[in-house]
Image (tube, helix red, strand yellow):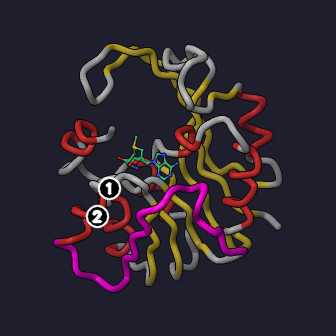
């Protein structure tokens, strides 16, 4: 399903939003990369000083991306978000680049609750939610879409450090035209 996407994202730079999020981190012990894909962001986190990075992604291809990177600090769990047993108060940073909405609609709120509870106090959560005006929101796909209000509720009890809502015409990794509606956030666990 993600083959074309991975091919396109093999050699790019780490995403700017994560670079920014790391600058908010006071401790760099444990990080979680949800939907790690080609592992560019996971490897970047190790380079930036994180001692342990857990990458979760259920696509079979992801195992290939870890093969030539022999570093004990990176642990790949080739399982779904649904199967991962989120530990409480563990991670200094949770990165989720363009991956959260693919969890699907069912139990999405409790998924995000588990993610937030997995952060240490002051831990940073960075990623995106998809907006309702996204052209993938055709009622047929197992992808979660939200209004701005709903996004703020998902991030409740967190300090919002950065927030942006963006809409643009663009293309998918397969080259199909689409309307993107995305909420970008960097948030910090308060309590
Ligand atoms: C759009 S890609 C983003 C990959 C990478 N974070 C990036 O920014 O290039 C979404 C990733 O999430 C993974 N993914 C989607 N749904 C998942 C799920 N339910 N459990 C685990 N991984 C999932 C896919 O396999 C894919 O690698």
148 magenta-colored:
no
* Main SS class of the magenta portion in the image: loop
Image quadrant occupied by the C terminus = bottom right
Residue at point 36%, 59% (across, down): 41
- Position of 42 compared to 164: left or right? left
The one of 38 and 80 positioned closer to us in this rendering: 80
Magenta segment boundaries in residue numbering: 68-88
Residue 120: x and y in percent read 69, 74
The one of 51 and 65 positioned closer to us in this rendering: 65
Image quadrant occupied by the N terminus = top left
Question: SS at mark 2?
Answer: helix
Residue 167: x and y in percent read 50, 19
Q: Which mark, residue 23?
A: none
According to the picture, the residue beneath numbered tag 1 turns out to be 60
Residue at point 46%, 42% (across, down): 98
76 magenta-colored:
yes
- For the residue carrying disc 1, how many other residues have a C-alpha within 10 Å: few (<14), some (14-19), or many (20+)? few
As measured in the structure, the alpha-carbon distance from the residue carrying label 1 to the one carrying label 2 is 6 Å
């Amino acid at each position: 399903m993600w083959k074309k996407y991975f091919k396109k994202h093999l050699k790019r730079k780490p995403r700017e939003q994560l670079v920014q999020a790391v600058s908010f981190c006071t401790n760099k012990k444990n990080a979680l990369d949800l939907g790690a894909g080609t592992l560019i962001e996971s490897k970047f986190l190790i380079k930036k000083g994180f001692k342990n990075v857990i990458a979760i992604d259920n696509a079979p291809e992801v195992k290939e991306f870890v093969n030539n990177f022999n570093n004990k600090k990176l642990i790949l769990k080739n399982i779904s978000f649904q199967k991962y047993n989120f530990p409480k108060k563990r991670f200094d940073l949770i990165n989720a680049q363009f991956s959260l909405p693919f969890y699907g609609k069912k139990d999405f709120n409790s998924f995000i609750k588990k993610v937030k509870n997995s952060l240490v106090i002051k831990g940073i959560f960075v990623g995106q939610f998809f907006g309702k005006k996204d052209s993938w929101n055709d009622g047929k796909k197992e992808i979660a879409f939200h209004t701005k209000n709903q996004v703020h509720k998902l991030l409740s009890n967190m300090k919002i450090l950065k927030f942006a809502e963006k809409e643009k015409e663009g293309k998918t990794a397969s080259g199909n035209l689409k309307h993107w509606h995305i909420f970008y956030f960097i948030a910090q666990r308060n309590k």
